[in-house]
Image: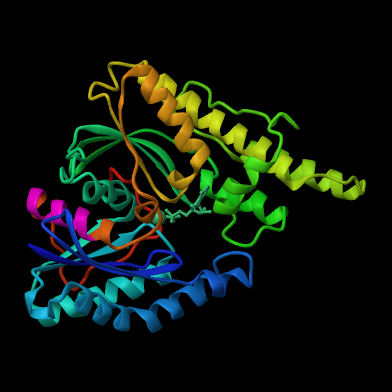
Amino acid sequence: MLILGFESSCDETAVAIVKDGREVLANKIASQIEIHALYGGVVPEIASRAHTEAISGLTNEALEEAGVSLSDIDAIAVTNCPGLIGALLVGVNFAKSLAFKLDIPLIPVHHIRGHIAANYCHFDGKDGKEYLEPPFTSLVMSGGHTSLIGVNSYTDFEIIGATRDDAAGEAFDKVARLLSLPYPGGAKMDKLAYEGDKTFIEFPQASVKDSPYDFSFSGLKTAAINFIHKLEQNKTEYNKADIAASYTDAVVKAIAKRVELLFNDMDLFKSKKFVLAGGVSANSHIRQAITMLAEKYGVKLYIPPLSLCGDNAVMIASQGYYEYTEDNKKADTTLNAYATMGVDEV
Ligand code: KG4
Ligand code: ZN
């Protein structure tokens, strides 16, 4: 089954063609980073306009890359939640029109479910790789989400813990911006942290009372912002890399603490399979810390390649395949987009 997938929830327009949920035939991404970098962050109105300009040409490029034509496509999958509403609507309307014209199923996909599904396309059982299938537990870390999710089946998701305030990506980006690193700062913080002293300052760790698996990064982020402001007000010279290293260390420890707790919780973590997902799972410090924990506890760890961590449409086509084949999920031309939506609510 050939699925044409669309993703436009934030600042990447993406179109992909995936066969039977796992085999990537085309993966096209038009990044808007250069446009938004001028403003230090995503400008929603500009994002919507850029999606509108890119989506049609990118679709033709994807068909060409896959060597297929529109008449070969069996279904269309599109991210319809969560994300920037104007941006989502561009993808939803384009996908809707195409599905209507071709008279093929239209499958709505939750963006975070998609991030998890990106792993199915890498861990496809080929070339000595594992074949990943549920049940497993996933740690999804992106610009807007940080959640521990029980993936009971391809379409049954259960939230174990989530952030109460900021997401890990947002927290990295905000501090990176204060350190004058160009947007999006997450990947630059990752590199800079290697050049600094992580013991330079110990940032506070927050825990959420009675919810050991929930995350909270806003206190940590504010502590870092105040610390940098104070240094600047006092005209104290400082090494940006020391802040990047100390801050990264605090984020890594906050994440590792929850992951270790989970690895010890055999009621919650029966599968002993742990899957990383989302843009922040590209962070090398987090990858290293979780790899060490997985080795210590004998957990099977699945880490997506860097190319499938950030936003893409392969992940949407893949999850779309499972939503359709497992749950017969389909939408009609009244399909809407939603800025917020729980991964377990759809
Ligand atoms: O999943 P994603 O591409 O988009 C959302 O769904 O939000 O995640 C984007 C986030 C941004 O905050 C970006 O700075 C962060 O992922 N990111 C990283 C790294 N690469 C991307 N954060 C930390 N370290 C990285 N290497
Ligand atoms: Zn994303």
- Is 324 above or below relative to 131? below
- Is 139 above or below relative to 270? below
Residue 211 visible here: no
User: 74 or 345, which is in the foreground?
Assistant: 74
- Residue 180 relative to residue 334: left or right: right
Q: How is the image coloured?
A: rainbow
Q: Which residues are magenta?
A: 317-326
User: 137 or 345, which is in the foreground?
Assistant: 137
Where residue 249 sits: x, y (%)?
61, 33
**The stretch drawn in magenta includes residue 324:** yes
Question: What is the magenta segment's predominant secondary structure?
Answer: helix
User: 303 or 79, which is in the foreground?
Assistant: 303
Q: Residue at coordinates 13% horizontally, 82% vertically from top-left? A: 101
Q: Quadrant of the N terminus?
A: bottom left
Q: Quadrant of ligand 2?
A: bottom left
**The stretch drawn in magenta includes residue 215:** no
Where residue 190 sits: x, y (%)?
57, 46
User: 259 or 267, which is in the foreground?
Assistant: 259
- Residue 225 relative to residue 98: left or right: right
Where residue 32 sits: x, y (%)?
48, 72
Residue 29 visible here: yes
Say which quarter of the image contains residue 132: top left
Say which quarter of the image contains residue 70: bottom left
Where residue 47 sits: x, y (%)?
47, 73
